[in-house]
Image (tube, rainbow, N blue to C red):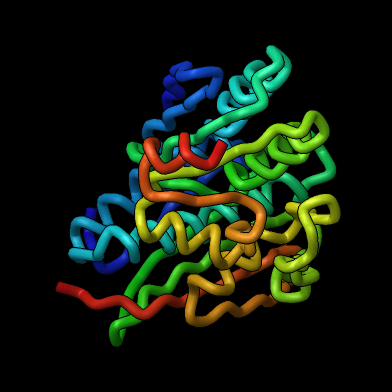
C-alpha cells in the first residue's frame, strides 16, 4: 500500500493506493496521526486507487476521526468503489463519515 | 494450481495474509469470479484468519492454520482449522453499528462483515481444533 499526501488550501488530502488490510493499516495509521498531530483539522481520504479494505482499515479511520473531533476537525472520504462503500454501509460507518464521489466535492464539505 | 480444490498451511503471523490473498486471487481468476465476489471472500478470510492469530494463542510458538478451499454446486466452501483456544465466531457479540461515534467500538466488526458476506458459517470444536466452515454462492464462468 502507498499513501500519497497533498495539501490544498489548508486541507490535507491522503490518497490511498492498493490494499488497506491488517498488514498495511499500521502504516496508514502512522501517516494520518502524523497529519493530525501537525495540527491539520481538515482531512480528505481519497479512495480512488484503493482496491481493498478490511476491518483493520476501518479501525484506523474510526480512531483518527475520534481524535480529530476533539479539535473540531473532520475527515471526509471520497471516490470509493461501490463494493468498498458497501463495507462502510454494513459497518454503519456511513453515519459517521461524509462520503462523496470526488475530491472536488470533498473540498466543498469544509 | 488446481481450481477445484486448494489446501494451504499458514503460520500464525500476519505476513501470511499475502500468501492467502494471492491464492484467493488465483482462484478468482481460475473460477472467473467477479471482483466484488472475490473482494467479499478475501475480506472474510482476512477477518477470520487475523482473529485466530490475534486471539487464538496464549504462547509464542509457531502454530499452523489449515485452509481448504473447494467448490461444489455453485458454492465456494472454505474450511479453516486452528489449534488455538476454543473460539466460536458465531457467538461473538454483534457490534452496535448505529450508536454515536463516541461510543462506537471496532470490536467484532470483522466477524459482522464476514457473516454478511458469506451465505453460511458453521463452527465446530473437534478435540483441540477449531473448525470454521464458510460457504458463499458463486457463479462459475
Left or right: residue A80 versus residue B124 is left
Left or right: residue A36 versus residue B119 is right
Residue B73 place in picture, x, y as percent: 29, 87
Q: Looking at the image, can residue A49 be seen?
A: yes
Residue B22 place in picture, x, y as percent: 34, 44
- Closer-to-camera residue (A25/B3): A25
Residue at 61% over, 29% down = A42
Residue B129 place in picture, x, y as percent: 70, 64
Residue at 70% over, 56% down = B83
- The residue positioned farthest toward the top in the image shown: A38
Left or right: residue B122 versus residue A8 is right
Q: How many marks?
A: 0
- Closer-to-camera residue (B30/B97): B97
- The residue positioned farthest toward the left in the image shown: B141
Residue at 69% over, 66% down = B130
Q: Is residue B3 above or below residue B74?
A: above
When asked about the image quadrant of residue B60, the answer is top right
- Closer-to-camera residue (A103/A23): A103
Residue A110 place in picture, x, y as percent: 56, 36
Residue at 74% over, 52% down = B106
Q: Looking at the image, can residue A51 be seen?
A: no
When asked about the image quadrant of residue A15, the answer is top left
Q: Is residue B27 above or below residue A67?
A: below
Q: Is residue B104 above or below residue B139?
A: above
Q: Quadrant of the C terminus of chain B?
A: bottom left
- Closer-to-camera residue (B43/A70): A70
Q: Is residue B46 above or below residue A106?
A: below
Amino acid at each position: 500500500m502507498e499513501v500519497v499526501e497533498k495539501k490544498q488550501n489548508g486541507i490535507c488530502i491522503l490518497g490511498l493506493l492498493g490494499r488497506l488490510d491488517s498488514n498495511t493499516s499500521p502504516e496508514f495509521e502512522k501517516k494520518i496521526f502524523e497529519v493530525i498531530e501537525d495540527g491539520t483539522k481538515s482531512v480528505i481520504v481519497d479512495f480512488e486507487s484503493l482496491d481493498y479494505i478490511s476491518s483493520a482499515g476501518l479501525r484506523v479511520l474510526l480512531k483518527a476521526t475520534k481524535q480529530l473531533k476533539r479539535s473540531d476537525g473532520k475527515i471526509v472520504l471520497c471516490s470509493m468503489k461501490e463494493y468498498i462503500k458497501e463495507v462502510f454501509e454494513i459497518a454503519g460507518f456511513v453515519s459517521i463519515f461524509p462520503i462523496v464521489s470526488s475530491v472536488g466535492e470533498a473540498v466543498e464539505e469544509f | 494450481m488446481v481450481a477445484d480444490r486448494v489446501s494451504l498451511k499458514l503460520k500464525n503471523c500476519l505476513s501470511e495474509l499475502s500468501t492467502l490473498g494471492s491464492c484467493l486471487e488465483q482462484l478468482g481468476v481460475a473460477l472467473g469470479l467477479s471482483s466484488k465476489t472475490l473482494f467479499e471472500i478475501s475480506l472474510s478470510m482476512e477477518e477470520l484468519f487475523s482473529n485466530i492469530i490475534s486471539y487464538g494463542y496464549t504462547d509464542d510458538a509457531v502454530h499452523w492454520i489449515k485452509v481448504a478451499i473447494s467448490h461444489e454446486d455453485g458454492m465456494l466452501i472454505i474450511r479453516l482449522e486452528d489449534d488455538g483456544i476454543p473460539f466460536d465466531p458465531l457467538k461473538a457479540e454483534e457490534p452496535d453499528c448505529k450508536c454515536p461515534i463516541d461510543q462506537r467500538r471496532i470490536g467484532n466488526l470483522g466477524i459482522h462483515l464476514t457473516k454478511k458476506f458469506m451465505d453460511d458459517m458453521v463452527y465446530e470444536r473437534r478435540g483441540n481444533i477449531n473448525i470454521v466452515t464458510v460457504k458463499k454462492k458463486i457463479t462459475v464462468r
